[in-house]
Image (spheres, helix red, strand yellow):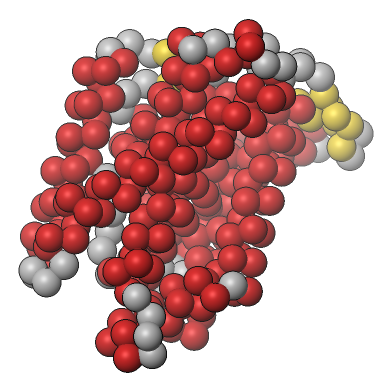
């Protein structure tokens, strides 16, 4: 039972991170039918921006730890959103009317550009986040001691996902995003600025990815320049498992993927953790090719 509780909470925390990254993939696909392969590198960029603010700039020395983390998160989300907006303007918007293959090649090129830019700016060495950002305390759950940082990561992920759910389903801009995903032509006839909607999506997705990058740095304590590849692939897997283009599916897929990884590593083998993850993906695609909640259907975005 002790192992089960520990892996359950760990899997939910890691799954929450996957879900935040997966939301960026699924929102862009819902609007443009395009896989933003550079999204994983935007996540890595967020992790490195957080490292710069907390370590190089030393915000913790100017503010209290809690305030420094909050300021870092806000700044990283803003800068990551700006990077995503520029990416859309430079790499995707000029190819909007081209065939889909051109956009895919552009996305892959942008991914390589961001990865190499991170390596050149911050070097190829592993970088370590401060070890004392959160107090080393535990909380009791079902008779087990759960690290505070695990609870914070999970709670942050859940809150952000709930806020995004509210934004998509209860605001005018959220309605515009859903309408554009259903039919861009009809949305334009209804007076919706589709270009603005696409820009908003490319702001929200990278902002969530940047937040996830900081969370990974705080949770694991270290980052590296090519981390975007692995996390991006797993988040993309989570989006497919849930149903690519389906926001609810991305959330569920991320949490499910985190649980599969955690329990697979604990009860089968740590060395086979990634293999188990992709085996589950294959099984789900064979049984339900469109994902658990199915690929985005207009009414279900």
Look at 35% across and 67% down and name the residue there. 196
Camera sees residue 231:
no
Considering only vertical position in the picture, is 104 above or below 152? below
Snapshot quadrant of residue 122: top left
Look at 71% across and 35% down and name the residue there. 152
Considering only vertical position in the picture, is 113 above or below 286? above
Position in image of residue 205 (x %, y %): 43, 52
Position in image of residue 6 (x %, y %): 73, 33
Position in image of residue 171 (x %, y %): 59, 72
Most foreground residue, 3 or 195: 195
Residue 94 falls left or right of residue 244 = left
Residue 223 falls left or right of residue 158 = left
Most foreground residue, 215 or 68: 68
Considering only vertical position in the picture, is 98 above or below 211? below
Position in image of residue 56 (x %, y %): 46, 10
Look at 49% across and 19% down and name the residue there. 53
Camera sees residue 114:
yes
Considering only vertical position in the picture, is 141 above or below 129? below
Question: Disc count in the image?
Answer: 0
Most foreground residue, 198 or 12: 198
Look at 66% across and 59% down and name the residue there. 162
Q: Quadrant of the N terminus?
A: top right
Snapshot quadrant of residue 44: top left
């Amino acid at each position: 039972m002790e192992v089960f509780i520990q892996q359950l909470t760990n899997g939910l925390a890691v799954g929450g991170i996957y879900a935040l990254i997966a939301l960026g993939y699924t929102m862009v696909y819902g609007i443009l039918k395009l896989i933003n392969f550079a999204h994983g590198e935007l996540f890595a960029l967020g992790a490195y921006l957080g490292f710069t603010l907390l370590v190089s700039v030393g915000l913790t020395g100017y503010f209290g730890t809690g305030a420094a983390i909050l300021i870092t998160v806000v700044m990283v989300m803003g800068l990551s959103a700006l990077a995503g907006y520029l990416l859309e303007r430079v790499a995707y918007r000029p190819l909007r009317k081209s065939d889909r293959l051109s956009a895919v090649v552009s996305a892959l090129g942008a991914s390589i550009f961001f990865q190499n830019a991170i390596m050149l700016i911050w070097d190829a060495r592993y970088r370590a986040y401060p070890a004392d950002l959160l107090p080393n305390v535990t909380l009791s759950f079902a008779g087990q001691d759960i690290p505070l940082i695990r609870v914070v990561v999970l709670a942050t992920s859940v809150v952000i996902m709930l806020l995004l759910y509210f934004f998509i389903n209860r605001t005018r801009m959220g309605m515009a995003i859903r309408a554009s995903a259903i039919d861009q032509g009809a949305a334009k006839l209804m007076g919706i600025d589709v270009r603005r909607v696409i820009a908003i999506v490319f702001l929200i997705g990278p902002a969530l990815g940047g937040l996830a990058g900081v969370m990974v740095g705080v949770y694991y304590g270290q980052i590296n320049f090519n981390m975007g590849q692995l996390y991006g692939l797993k988040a993309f897997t989570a989006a497919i498992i849930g149903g690519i283009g389906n926001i609810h599916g991305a959330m569920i897929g991320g949490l499910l993927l985190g649980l599969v990884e955690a329990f697979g590593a604990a009860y089968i083998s740590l060395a086979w953790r990634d293999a188990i993850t992709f085996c589950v993906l294959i099984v789900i695609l064979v049984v339900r090719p469109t994902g658990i909640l199915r690929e985005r259907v207009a009414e279900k975005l």
